[in-house]
Image (cartoon, grey):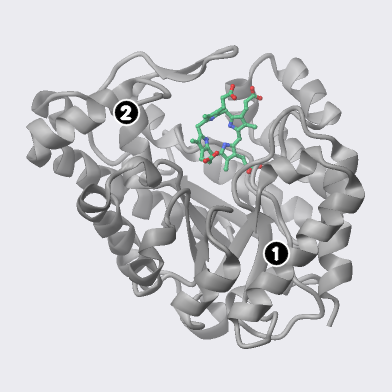
Amino acid sequence: MKNDRLLRALRREPVDCTPVWLMRQAGRYLPEYRATRARAGSFLAMAKTPELACEVTLQPLARFPLDAAILFSDILTIPDAMGLGLYFVDGEGPKFERTVRTAADVDRLSVPDMETSLRYVMDAVRLIRRELDGSVPLIGFSGSPWTLACYMVEGGGSDNFARIKALALNDPATLHRLLAVNTDAVVAYLSAQRAAGAQVLQVFDTWGGVLSPAMYREFSLPYLVRIARELERGDGVARTPLILFGKGNAPYLDALAASGCEGLGVDWTVSLEDAALRTQGRVALQGNLDPATLYASPAAISEQVRLVLDSYQAGNGGSREGHVFNLGHGLSPDMSPGHVAALVDAVHIHSAR
Ligand code: CP3
């Protein structure tokens, strides 16, 4: 591997500077992404065609000196492969033709076969690895059992999570069965991505933070812990690191750090100093610049990057090791590629050892 900063940082080993990658680094803020998407006809056609998924995965790396590639795909490939019928309505986000709301709906679900219904994802991973040719590591990913369940029960995005929260309270056993099959699917999906060539794995628990503490500890946390425990990922330097990212996971960092994962991704509502003090070197930390910082000037971005780097160092006993720089959530379509370039450069410059 020509650039193994990310893998080293996830093992909390010394690096020449802090590695950086960005959630949604391949996306609509890049004109070349919009061009490929127009050629493909739709987001889903692009994600389901390995050559196009590979092309857009590599686009941000051609522009910026990023320290990792992330597979271009979506978390909703799993429920789609379970037969729910994923589609996108422009401006409204993801939707499902069929929802999961009753015990009978859950009975119909099973773990999809990874080399048939999700073959296109594994083919994309294999192709991207070949094209990267060892330049930077490739990150594979999945949604968390809870976050996938949110889309499956609601039938799409939601403002208030009314249906899934009502299900949690009215019929918790049915929701637990849904979360259990999702967990089995996530473990199989991440294992298959690893076998296909993914070198780091990240679970996105985007909606864990909408739960009360009692509900988070019942419906999200135990399934994240199961993934960290059950996912076979090798030993020592050959171990494939697992990062658990969660929006709003700050109250649970102690429990998450004890799960057995290698890295924790946090949003910008917690300081990395606090996060590092609470996790005490048990895991690497990833994050956590507020994505809205990218709307400010390059000089302001550079200053905010320095504050995030220094905050981590202050909580980590004066050392910068064990930090992966990222945003606290994804890039948005109206962000400027020039400002993203300023961010990436600032990380490498300010963190040079
Ligand atoms: O980070 C990367 O560059 C990798 C690609 C990636 C996408 N989706 C591409 C995508 C990843 C890691 C995801 C994960 C994902 N998808 C999550 C979890 C991460 C997060 O943001 O918290 C969620 C909740 C989804 C579900 C989903 N898919 C949403 C809410 C949307 C946006 C809909 C919209 O119109 O804004 C998608 C579509 C999607 N996935 C896009 C991209 C680049 C935009 C599609 C387009 O080109 O129109």
Q: As rendered, which of 39 and 320 lies closer to the eye?
A: 320
Q: Can you identify the residue that label 1 sits on?
A: 308
> Where, quadrant-wise, is the N terminus in this rendering?
bottom right
Give the residue type that dot 2 points to: Phe
Q: Residue at x 51, y 85 (%)?
A: 236
Report the label total: 2
User: In the image, which is nearer the foreground, mark 2 or mark 1?
Assistant: 1
SS at mark 2? loop
Does any portion of residue 174 appear in the rendered image? no
Does any portion of residue 114 appear in the rendered image? yes
- Which is more N-terminal, label 1 or label 2? 2
Report the Cα–Cα distance between label 2 and label 1.
Answer: 32 Å
User: Could you say where residue 302 lies in the image, as x and y percent from the top left?
Assistant: 85, 57
* Residue 170 location, quadrant: top left
Is residue 310 shown above or below 128?
Answer: below
User: Do residues under tags 2 and 1 come within 8 Å of each other at their CB atoms?
Assistant: no
Q: As rendered, which of 284 and 37 lies closer to the eye?
A: 284
Is residue 262 shown above or below 67?
Answer: below
CB of mark 1 near ligand 1 (< 8 Å)? no
* Residue 295 location, quadrant: top right
User: Could you say where residue 25 lies in the image, as x and y percent from the top left?
Assistant: 72, 43
Task: Judge the density around disc 1: few (<14), some (14-19), many (≥20) Cα neighbours within 10 Å.
Answer: many
Q: Residue at x 48, y 38 (%)?
A: 75
Is residue 17 shown above or below 56?
Answer: below
Q: As rendered, which of 78 and 294 lies closer to the eye?
A: 294
Q: Residue at x 33, y 69 (%)?
A: 255
* Residue 177 location, quadrant: top left
Left or right of 11 in this view: 39: right
Give the residue type that dot 1 points to: Val
User: Could you say where residue 138 lies in the image, as x and y percent from the top left?
Assistant: 65, 57
Left or right of 217 in this view: 41: right
Which label was assigned to residue 161?
A: 2
